Amino acid sequence: MSNSYKIAVIAGDGTGPEVIKEGCKVLDVAAGKFDIKLEKISYDLGGERYLKTGEVLPDSVLEELRTFDAIYLGAIGHVDVKPGILEKGLLLKLRFDLDQYINLRPVKLYPSVDCPIKNKGPQEIDYTVVRENSGGLYTGIGGLSRAGTKDEVAVQQMMYTYDQVERCLRYAFDYTRRYGKKARGIGDKNTLALVGKSNVLTYMYELWNRVFAEVGAEYPDVTREYYHVDATCLYMVACPEIFDVVVTENMFGDIITDLAAITQGGLGVAAGGNINPDGVSMFEPIGGTAPMWTGKNAINPLAAIGAGAMMLTALGEEQAGRAIETAIAQTTPKMKSQMANEMGYSTTEVGDLVAAAL
Ligand code: IPM
Ligand code: MN
């Protein structure tokens, strides 16, 4: 009997539906090839629905989403909706309410993809950022006092509990053991680097560093390193090859993964997963809605296709996930660029190329 999975598809706004369509095309080919059943159900969440009905994420829909094996998300954000409403009400709410406490962001430069860093290629740019996805500044604790006066005070607090730090680091150590450079046969050790700012955020990184050492003691096969976040930005450009798996708190992870994305060819190729290892995970291209390219069949679908590959891997279909990644690697050399409208192919044609390679 074939393995069967229920997937909720939230194509969302802007170019989301166009890239998700290509992702589904490739997923269907993979499913046929590897004898997997994918039952996809679409949800029309996003800006259009909000503008029509005032609903962002009804409780009943959230409850339904809990019953799926995974969520496949396009992009959220709408030019006619005030920034924050959809991001907080939909994307962040899903991450929090489904307790997707890991944001997994592989940084992989595919063959022949233009890299803005001189003399760096696929060998040098091949690491993963494990971003904590449930706490820190994203917790939303804070407030304004005496707003509108010269005595105004704004507070936004970075908050972590021991449990949040521990579960994140444990995931990162497990991931490194399984997918580090030694495990993948491209290095002589598996290395996990904690990224922080222990010289300034002394309380926060006292906690992170202590738990890093504590949990790390259970993983003698994983080499531990520590870098400050500012130095990390420098190294990601100057010597990205030093990285294997990187783990960091939420906001630092948000920032460094945009930098990482441009080193792997831009947001058109960068995929990510919001992971609850014991629950419902959600996979998305990290690029956003690209309103300028909406409806033009010009946006790059590779990030969405890559997110689909990550989804299959997370569901336990590693062979199928890897096959899609290989098909992407066979497609990038045929493309002129990874930039929207400059690919030498349309969105649907790139989807066809990956499907054919598969
Ligand atoms: C990301 C995005 C989100 C974040 C925004 C849209 C809320 O930038 O997924 O990296 O900050 O996490
Ligand atoms: Mn971001």
Image (cartoon, rainbow, N blue to C red):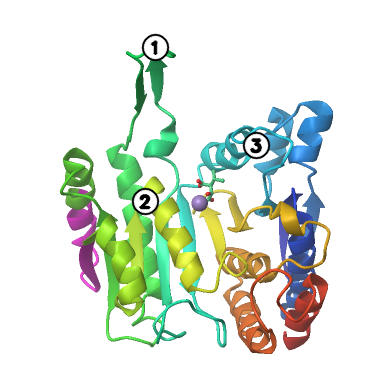
Mark 1: secondary structure: loop
Q: Mark 1 = which residue?
A: 149
Q: Sort mark 1 into few (<14), some (14-19) or many (20+) by Cα contacts within 10 Å.
A: few
Q: Mark 2 = which residue?
A: 252
**Is 215 part of what is drawn in magenta?**
yes
Q: Please indicate whether residue 244 sits to the left or right of residue 285 in the image.
A: left
Which span of residues is magenta-colored? 211-226
How far is the residue under mark 1 from the one under mark 3? Answer: 29 Å
Mark 1 residue CB less than 8 A from any atom of ligand 1? no
Q: In which quarter of the image is residue 137?
A: top left
Q: What residue type is labelled 1?
A: Thr
Q: Earlier in the sequence, mark 2 or mark 3?
A: 3
Q: In which quarter of the image is residue 7?
A: bottom right
Mark 2: secondary structure: helix
Residue 69 % position (x, y): 65, 54
Q: Mark 3 = which residue?
A: 86
**Is 241 part of what is drawn in magenta?**
no
Q: Please indicate whether residue 258 sits to the left or right of residue 208 in the image.
A: right
Q: Sort mark 2 into few (<14), some (14-19) or many (20+) by Cα contacts within 10 Å.
A: some
Q: In which quarter of the image is residue 312?
A: bottom right
